[in-house]
Amino acid sequence: MFDFGPFFDNIDQILEGFWATVRLAAVAAVLSMLFGTILVSFRVSPVPVLRTFGTVYVNVLRNTPLTLVLLMCSLGLNDELALKFSESNSTYYWWAVLGLSGYTAAFVCEALRAGVNTVPLGQAEAARSIGLTFGQSLRMIILPQAFRAVLAPLGSVLIGMIKNTTVAAAAGYAEAATKMKDLLDLPSFTSGALPLFIGVAAGFMILTLPTGFFFGWLHKRMAVAR
Amino acid sequence: MTDSEGEPEPATGGGPQDAIPGAGPLVVVEHVDKHFGELHVLKDINLTVNRGEVVVVIGPSGGGKSTLCRSINRLEPIDGGTILVDGRELPKEGKELARLRADVGMVFQSFNLFAHKTILENVTLGPIKVRKQGRAESEKHALELLDRVGIADQAQKYPVQLSGGQQQRAAIARSLAMKPKVMLFDEPTSALDPEMVNEVLDVMTGLARDGMTMIVVTHEMGFARRAAQKVVFMADGQIVEENTPDEFFTNARTDRAKDFLSKILTH
Ligand SMILES: Nc1ncnc2c1ncn2[C@@H]1O[C@H](COP(=O)(O)OP(=O)(O)OP(=O)(O)O)[C@@H](O)[C@H]1O
Ligand SMILES: [Mg+2]
């Protein structure tokens, strides 16, 4: 039962799957941080329209299952409305990136908003009183401290995002978990499912554990002393 | 209107926005009203601060002293009346407000230094980002200012590494770096341990001597007598009495002020 033979026999397929996972996760990490930062700027902005947009966006995305978000992207927007990134299959990759980033951004935004709340209001007033605009004080005073305050929670959000890549199959994008399922479905695959699961799970940990440690370390290093 | 042969200029013609900077009183507060919901916090406030004048604002808690300070640089919007700084009303919002607001320096009770930046960075941020000065020039000026407030040796430290008195002096330097026309101080020494109060008051007295226009909310009578030309007593959102420091502390005109003074003088 614990024969890792089939796992290593198919290691090429599995590595290919993980490479797809990494390509998705890396781009989604950058984009979700970017979108999340923009969203939190909206949520704390003095402009009511932006605040409302931020609030609605976060609450809708945070409360919709990711599978639905991704199906909406692939079947709804790409196939039904023909909003395609390209004519090739890569359009599904980009929809997976966008869906996952848009979804994760809602969580990044909320983590950052908790960070914004750790910055004393007086600092924002001091920033305004020396003539910084709202945007400048957000960029130079508030957000840098907010980020540092929530690095550890942001690490958790990213870990969640990496695991959520397995849902990207819903967007028609084949990553590690899809490959695994494909292998299991092969008629030739008769035994060794458990080792396969364990191997793929270990693969995910190779991605997520360092992410967690890195952000935890960063959190300690960058903490703003008060 | 250079071609209006000999005709006297109508004094009110162009409105306050056209007033010549550099002439007339520096801060003019006229008929200012402010509410927080139901609460009437500023009631028809009128106050004129001349160039180089130091005005001490004193009064019981909740009287509206902080709100008045914060209204002058529009950290709080007002409901009615006008506030002119150097002949100009601060714009309602936007970039223009941000730029003009830097003409009004503000020092807070809780220092409010930027915790993630060094003391030097705290002082140079405004000049670099708002006044668009070069870094080298800004740092040179910042170090001069830090020297003036007596903490040049702390320039590379972070706010948390400084004592309260040193932090407040850094905050004063940060405001001065913007070369403000007027400085507002809202209870600058009341968060300090007693032994640090004087080092901050000394810096402020020095500023006053050098001709800085200042509006200072404080209960430090020594400072008021030494540095101020005028004491304004505020209670319940109104200016109850305006007087010279000596007259006010020895011979207050209003019962409200006498009552207040008897309370702060007994301890
Ligand atoms: N942001 C706010 N929202 C609602 N009410 C406020 C706000 N700021 C101040 N107030 C109220 O307005 C009144 C005046 O407050 P203000 O802080 O100006 O008084 P103060 O004279 O500075 O008092 P203190 O000596 O305690 O600092 C108080 O009753 C206060 O509770
Ligand atoms: Mg106050």
Image (cartoon, coloured by chain):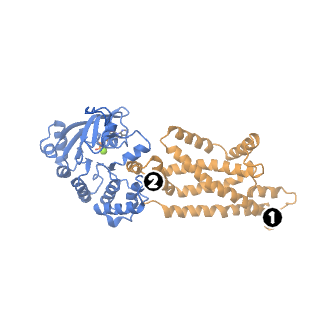
Chain colours: A orange, B blue
Is mark 1 in CB contact (under 8 Å) with mark 2?
no
Q: Which residue is mark 2?
A: A141
Q: Numbered disc 2: what chain?
A: A
Residue B128: image quadrant is bottom left
Instruction: Estimate the x, y position of residue A150 in percent, counting from the top left.
Output: 52, 55
Q: In which quadrant will I find the C terminus of chain A? A: bottom left
Expressed as whole percent of the image width and height from the top left, the position of residue A168 reads: 72, 51
- Direction from residue A201 to residue A7 in the image, left or right: right
Q: Nearer the viewer, residue B103 or B148?
A: B103
Residue A10's disc number: 1
Labels 1, 2: front one: 2
Instruction: State left or right for residue B149 relative to residue A130.
Output: left
Residue B199 drawn above or below residue A46:
below
Q: Is residue A162 visible?
A: no
**Could you tell me if residue B130 is visible in this image?**
yes
Type of residue at label 2? Ile
User: A196 and B7: which one is in front?
Assistant: B7
Residue A29 image label: none
**Label 1: chain letter:** A
Residue type, numbered disc 1: Asn
Residue appearing at x 13%, y 43% in the figure: B247
Q: Quadrant of residue B147?
A: bottom left
Sequence-wise first label, 1 or 2 = 1
Point 38% across, 38% down: residue? B77
Please name the residue shown 39% across and 55% down the image. B127
Q: Residue furthest left?
A: B251
**Towards the viewer: A40 or B207:** B207
